[in-house]
Image (tube, coloured by chain):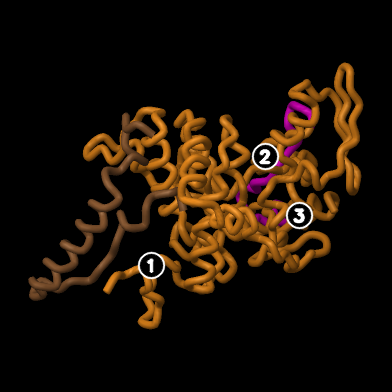
Chain colours: A brown, B orange
Amino acid sequence: MIGIEPERVQFSWISAGEGERFANIIEKITNEVKKIGPAKRLVKGAKQ
Amino acid sequence: MIQNLRTEVKKLLKDKKVDIIIGWEKGSLPLSSTPAFIQKEEDVDRLIFDETCRNNLTTYLTKDKRKLGKTYDKIGIIVKGCDARSIVLYSIEQQIKRENIVIIGVPCNGILEKKKILQKTDGKEILKSKIDGKNVHLKGRDFDLTIPLKDVLCDSCLTCKYPDAPVHDIFIGKPRKEVDIKDEFKNVIDFEKKSSEERWEYIKEEYSKCIRCYACRNVCPACYCNECFVDQNDPQWIGKTPEVTDSIIFHLIRNLHVAGRCVDCGACVSACPADLDLRIMNKKVEKEIKERFDYTAGLDINEKPVMASYCENEKQDFIMG
């Protein structure tokens, strides 16, 4: 709504026993966030 | 109408049904009103109700004793539709005991937005004013204007579906019942269609005007925390500068705190000295809650708070695989 990239905020349920699932999801998110690069919005002093 | 209101209020005071009546009286400037606290029968004639009765007086009902000076056992309060919905929330959230409050509903035709009027007069001082049915007549030193009422009503009044108190003990005059409004969320829907860049630009532009005076929070009937998160130092939740990032975070958190509780009374918009578009985010959250939970705040006094109840078949489409 305010223009934050949807890839940057993601939700999931992972149980403490689901180690592999945790690793997979984290990898997926980090890849997606890397793709869109560093946050420029809502960051103090960032060049807009 | 006003005579009926005064007679009813006098009766309440005479029969000792209430200790104090909270309503509006004429303000010192044209087109202004100010809260009135009436305890004696002879003061009842000061009460007014018209398009200038802006304040959502229900904030005086919360436990915050700084506002009324002391606690009263029985309080009578004069309310518009939005104000009554705030009382419903207080009751749901156990801030008041419903039986201690006498709710007096009045028929509301919308409230004037001072900022819109001042735009029409180019900021020039209004010396005399008169409201009749559909127009407002304004007189100043070098102008004489007649403006249709609907041009200078609050935005929230223009999309108001519930002008009458959904819960009341006494209703003065004729209720308008539910008003059929189809484009209640028009501003939000238009905004959602824009691109991420456009939305960010708009939000940044709007919220950079914020001077962090917290007037929006202070007038908000839903903001009654003893200590607001913005005032806390340990831990300090947000930066306290008027820098745009800090301001956006403040407003976003406030949006979420009033999620499912905001009745769109427009008090924050009217109180804002920097003329921010505070309504767009509140309306967005309202729309989201309406779509997901089919819930509208402040209509049913027996309903559970929407953000504090859980139902198994709620949509979970925001959760990834």
Q: Is residue A18 left or right of residue B210?
A: left
Quadrant of the drawing holding the C terminus of chain B: bottom left
Q: Residues within 10 Å of mark 3 (few under 14, many from 20)?
A: many
- As drawn, the label of residue B308 is 1
Magenta range: B12-30
Q: Quadrant of the N terminus of chain B?
A: bottom right
Q: Residue at x 38, y 79 (%)?
A: B311
Residue, x 26% and y 37% (percent of image)? Answer: B236
Question: What residue does disc 2 label?
Answer: B36
| Residue B283 appears in view | no
Q: Is label 2 or label 1 in front?
A: 1
Per the image, label 2 sits on a secondary structure element best described as strand
Q: Please tell me whether residue B186 is drawn above or below residue A45 in the rendered image.
A: below
Instruction: Say which residue label 3 marks.
Output: B108
Name the spot of residue B25 as percent of width and height, x first. Answer: 73, 38
Subunit that carries the residue with mark 1: B
Residue located farthest toward the front when viewing the structure as drawn: A35
Whichever of labels 3 and 2 marks the residue nearer the N terminus, that label is 2
